[in-house]
Image: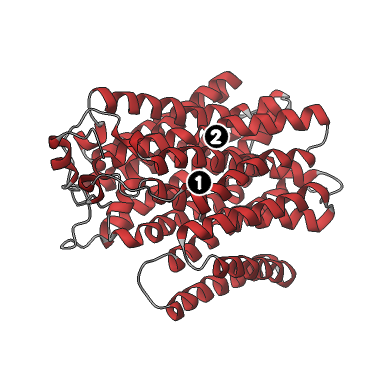
Amino acid sequence: MAGISPSTRTETANVGYDNTQNYRGPLIVVTLLFFMWGFITCMNDILIPKLQEVFTLQHWQAMLIQTAFFGAYFIVSLLYFIFSMTKGDPIMRIGYKNGIIVGLVIAAIGCVLFYPAADYESYGFFLLALFVLASGITILQIAANPYVTILGPPDSAASRLNLTQALNSLGTTVAPVIGGYLIFEGVQTAGSADSVQMPYLALAGALILIAVLIKIARLPHVAGEGRIIPDAGALKYRHLVLGIICIFMYVGGEVTIGSTLISFFKLPQIAGLDESAAKHFLAFYWGGAMVGRFFGAAALTGSGSKGSKYLLIAIVAAIAFIAVFSIYGLDQALIILALIAINFVVLLIGGFSASRTLGYFAAAVIALLLITCFATGSLAMWSVIAIGLFNSIMFPTIFTLAIKGLGVHTSQGSSLLVMAIVGGAIIPPLQGYIADVTDNLQLSFLVPMACYAYIVYYGFFGSKVKQVDASVSEERV
C-alpha cells in the first residue's frame, strides 16, 4: 500500500499466527468474556420495560437506555482511535491481556453504580451507570475480538469468532430468564427500581472474578505487542471502511429488534403476553443467535470435511430441540426445529462461504421482517423470533471480513468497528419515534429492514479485499 513507511512494513511482518503455540487454553479463558458481555448487554432488554414502568417513560425515552449504552461504544472507540492515530495503539502498547483486564474493571464499576442510581431513583443516574458499564465492554470488544482471530490459523478466524460469539449468545439467552425473574418477580418495592441493585452487584463481582482469572492465566503474547506506530493506516483499507458501516447497520438492526420484542409480544394482535411470559420468547430470539453461531463455527472453519460439519450441526440442532422440549414441550420444540431447518437450508445456499452466507442471511432477515410487519398472531411472532437464527453469524463474520489483512493495524481497525456499534444507540430511538408517531409498533419494524439491505450489499460485494501493496499483502491476521 502506498505511503507506508519502511518501519511500518517491518512491524507488519511481526503480527500474526504462530503455529508453534497451542492456543486452545487461552481461547477457552477468553470465551468467558464473551458470555459475560452477552449477558450484560441483553439485560438492557429487561431494564427497558422495567424503567419505563418505574419512571413512566415514552418509547423513545426508554430507548435512551440503549443510546447511553451503545453511545459509550462510539465515544470510547473514537477516543481510542484518535489516541492510536496520534500517540500509537494503546492495546498494542500494553498487550491484549492487560487491555482485557482494564475493560473488566471499568465494566464492574459501572455495575456498582446501579446501586446508588436505584437509591436516588434517578433515570439520569441509571444512564450514567450504563455509560460507564458500556465503556468497559467497549475496551473488551476492542481487545478480545481481534485477539480471538489471531489465536489460530487465519483461514478459521471466522469459525473461532463465531464459536466465542456463540457463548456470547448463551449469555443473551439466559439473561432474559434469569434477569427477568430477578427484576420482575424478585423481592421489590412496587414502583421502585430497587430490584435491579442486587443483580448488578452480582455482575460486578463476576467481572472482578474474571479479571483475576485473566490476570493469573498464562495468555500468550501476540507478535507485534509493544510496538507503537502512530498513524491512521487502518482507514486505507476499503473493506474495513465498508465493514464499519456494516457493523453500524447490523448492531442497529439487531438491538432495535431485541429491544422491542417484549412490547411487541404484548400487542393483542400478536400474542397479548405480559412481561413475565414474554421474556421466555425473548430467550428464544437470543437462543436462536446462539444456535446459529454454533452452526457458523462448524460450517465456516477452513478445515474438516462436509460430513463432519453436517454432523456437528446435527448435534447442535438435536441439543436445541431436546432443551426446548424439556422446558417448553413438544409443540414449541417442533417450531424451533422447523426454524433451524430453514436456517440450515440458507446456510447450504451460502456454500459455507463467510461472505456469501452473510449476504443470504441478511436477505432472509428482510423476508422475515416483512412478515413481522404485515402478519398477525403466531406467524408474526415466530417470524421475528426466527430473525435471531439469521442474525447469529453476522457480527463475528462482518468483524472477521473487515479486519482481514490489517496486520499491525488490526486493533486500530477493531476500535473503528467497535465504534460503529453506536448503531445500537441511534437506530432503536428512531424505531421508537416511528412507533410513537404512527401509533403502530408493528409497522415500525420497517426501520431495521434498511439496515439489513446494506448487510446484503456488504456480504456479496463490499467485503471483497482490494489488491494492496505487496508489503501489506504479506500480513496475516
Residue 417 drawn at (x, y percent): 42, 38
Q: Which mark is residue 423?
A: 2
Residue 438, relative to residue 404: is it above or below?
A: above
Residue 89 appears in view: yes
Residue 307 drawn at (x, y percent): 45, 81
Q: Which residue is mark 1?
A: 39
Marks 2/1 in contact by CB < 8 Å: the verdict is no
| Residue type highlighted by circle 1 | Phe
Residue 142 drawn at (x, y percent): 36, 39
Q: Which mark is residue 87?
A: none
Q: Nearest the camera: 29 or 195?
A: 29
Residue 404 drawn at (x, y percent): 34, 49
Label 1 crowd (10 A; few <14 / some 14-19 / many >=20): many
Which residue is pictured at 79% across the width and 44% down the height?
266
Residue closest to the far bottom: 307
Residue closest to the far right: 269
Residue 287 appears in view: no
Which residue is pictured at 71% across the width and 67% down the height?
335
Which residue is pictured at 65% across the width and 70% down the height?
337
Residue 406, relative to residue 430: is it above or below?
A: below
Residue 190, relative to residue 300: is it above or below?
A: above
Dot in front, 2 or 1: 2
Cα distance between the residues tagged 2 and 1: 19 Å
In the picture, the quarter occupied by the N terminus is top left
For residue 118, what is the image quadrant? top right
